[in-house]
Image (cartoon, rainbow, N blue to C red):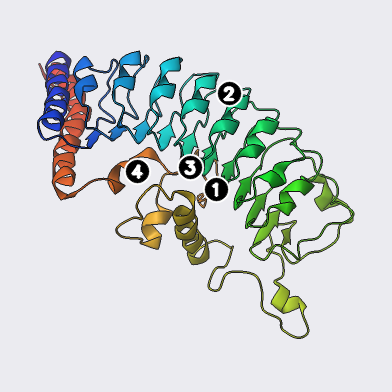
Amino acid sequence: MSAILKFIRENHILALIEQTIAKKRSRLSLNAYEITEIPSLLYTCLEVEHLYLHRNKITNVPVQITQLVNLTTLTLDYNNIDFLPPEIGNLKNLVNLNISYNPLKVLIPEIGELENLEAFWCNRIGLQEIPKEIGKLEKLDTFGARGNELKTIPDEMTKLTRLRWLTLENNLIETLPNTMDRMEALVHCNLRNNRVREFPESVLRCSELMFLQLNNNQISCLPEDFDTSFLSSLEMIDLRQNPICELSHPEHPLVRYSEEMPTTEAELSPQGSSSRHTPGLDLGAGAGAQALAINATALRLPAVPAPRHPDPMAIADMDLEASSGESSVDWENSVNSSELDVQYQNDEERAENEIAQFFQAVGMVLPELSRYASTAS
């Protein structure tokens, strides 16, 4: 039965590729098909711009993939890839790249040749060092390297003047460059669950900063000249689970030391001056967090069209590549590749995707049916 299923699946994959070629489609979704080797026919899809290969069993990315020079989106996350060809730097039109959850261990320096890259995710790939060539990605807006083994980030990374979303949580980072303020567009900086000992004062000079997450680090004090008055967009600095929380520390309306949210400026001020918090957004759980999710998603990926139905509940249910042990309100983490996939579908492609889901469902059910058939006999 498994041989029959494999035959059906492989032929269905080839049929999808052939349709993409015949109709000159710009999008090809081959995620979750248990693909172990990329079919060579795929490299003739010269019109394709959005290619989804996530959640398969791919071990090797052949150099031929660089023949798809029109690619703007490439998802390879959740595979078994341990090496990327240096020629991947030839994909000059690439805007979104996701290589998360692969045993890659390293980022090749040729990543820096992707001159149009805006969103790059390399979460949980065993990364110990970010190559200095990352600083060449002048258009980079979103960078996520969660759950790796990073101890620092290169000075060259602070050259990314368009970077708005930086997510480096769950690493081993001890020190940060003192030139973080060069990332003048930085909106959200997530450094939680690291080993940072000194408050990254230079981050506070990023004038667009809204959220700075430093919870669960080794910070014991704030800078002597700590001042956030010039940060008109700042919403919160999270310092929970740091030594400073157990020591004497200055209270601040935008600094969070405990599970209780900091008091807003409006509540502290006798004149009832207006708070810098965005109207209608409460940083606690529930509807406020869902509203933040929508806001954050819109900010994070300018290269990706806004969802057709920005339903807060739908956003709350999104799988943001967070493990089951992490917060369910992890709106600041990377958008799942399946979300990118859906956003680029037209009506015809959505209909075909339902057929594809049927084949995937059959793939999960047939082995179980086969087991019952064998025991019944």
Name the residue that disc number 3 marks: 334
- Residue 1 found in image quarter: top left
Q: Amino acid at mark 1?
A: Ser
Residue 180 at what x, y percent from top left?
A: 71, 43
* Mark with earlier residue (2, 4): 2
Pick out the residue farthest to the bottom.
Answer: 271
Mark 1 packing: few (<14 Cα in 10 Å), some, or many (20+)?
few
The CA span between labels 2 and 3 is 17 Å
Q: Which mark is residue 178?
A: none
| Closer-to-camera residue (179/289) | 179
* Mark with earlier residue (2, 1): 2
Residue mark closest to the camera, 2 vs 1: 2
Residue 105 at what x, y percent from top left?
A: 54, 18
Mark 3 packing: few (<14 Cα in 10 Å), some, or many (20+)?
many
Give SS at disc 1: loop
The answer to whether one can see residue 252 in this image is yes
Give SS at disc 2: loop
Q: Amino acid at mark 3?
A: Ser
Name the residue that disc number 2 marks: 127
* Mark with earlier residue (3, 1): 1
Q: Residue at position x 75%, y 56% from top?
A: 257
Q: Residue at position x 68%, y 44% from top?
A: 182
Residue 72 at what x, y percent from top left?
A: 35, 36
The CA span between labels 2 and 4 is 24 Å
Name the residue that disc number 1 marks: 327
Judge left or right: residue 307 versus residue 43.
right
* Mark with earlier residue (4, 1): 1
The CA span between labels 2 and 1 is 23 Å
Name the residue that disc number 4 marks: 340
Q: So how many labels did they put on this image?
A: 4
